[in-house]
Image (cartoon, helix red, strand yellow):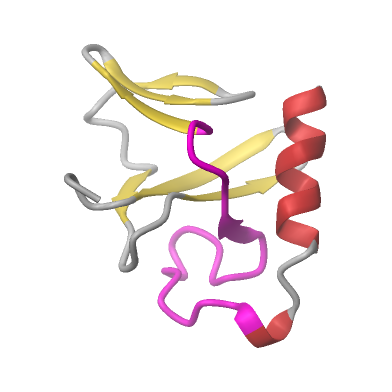
C-alpha cells in the first residue's frame, strides 16, 4: 500500500507540462503514467520486479521500452497497466 501511495504521488506531481506524448494508447495514452524513482522497476532473472505490483515475466505484454532514460509505471489504483523500462545500460 505504501508503495502504491509513493507511485501515485509521483504521478500526481507530473502535471500536464511534463506529460510524455509517447505513451501508447494500448497502455494508458498518458493519463495514468509517469516516471518513477530508480529501484521501483528492477530487472531480475525471472522477470521485471515492479515495486508494489510483483514480478512480471519477460513475456508479459505490459512490459515496454521507455523512450527516455527513465523507468515509467502506468497504473490506476492497484491495477498495473504497463511498465516502460529504461533501455539497458542507462
Where, quadrant-wise, is the N terminus in this rendering? top right
Q: Residue at position x 58%, y 70% from top?
A: 30
Q: Is residue 5 magenta?
A: no
Q: Residue at position x 58%, y 38% from top?
A: 80
User: 20 or 77, which is in the foreground?
Assistant: 20
User: 87 or 38, which is in the foreground?
Assistant: 38
Residue 35, by quadrant, is bottom right
Q: x, y (%) of residue 67?
A: 31, 68
Farthest residue to the bottom: give it.
17
- Magenta region's main secondary structure? loop
Q: Does 26 sit above or below residue 36?
A: below
User: 64 or 17, which is in the foreground?
Assistant: 17
Q: Is residue 39 magenta?
A: yes
Q: Does 26 sit above or below residue 64?
A: below
Q: Residue at position x 25%, y 51% from top?
A: 90
Q: x, y (%) of residue 66?
A: 33, 59
Q: Does 4 sit above or below residue 35?
A: above
Q: Residue at position x 66%, y 36% from top?
A: 79
Where does the magenta region start and end? 18-40
Amino acid at each position: 500500500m505504501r508503495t502504491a501511495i509513493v507511485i501515485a504521488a509521483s504521478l500526481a506531481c507530473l502535471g500536464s507540462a511534463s506529460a510524455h506524448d509517447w505513451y501508447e494508447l494500448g497502455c494508458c495514452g498518458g493519463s495514468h503514467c509517469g516516471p518513477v524513482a530508480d529501484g521501483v522497476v528492477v530487472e531480475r532473472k525471472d522477470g521485471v520486479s515492479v515495486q508494489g505490483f510483483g514480478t512480471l515475466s519477460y513475456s508479459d505484454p505490459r512490459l515496454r521500452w521507455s523512450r527516455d532514460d527513465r523507468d515509467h509505471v502506468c497504473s490506476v489504483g492497484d491495477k498495473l497497466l504497463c511498465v516502460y523500462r529504461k533501455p539497458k545500460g542507462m
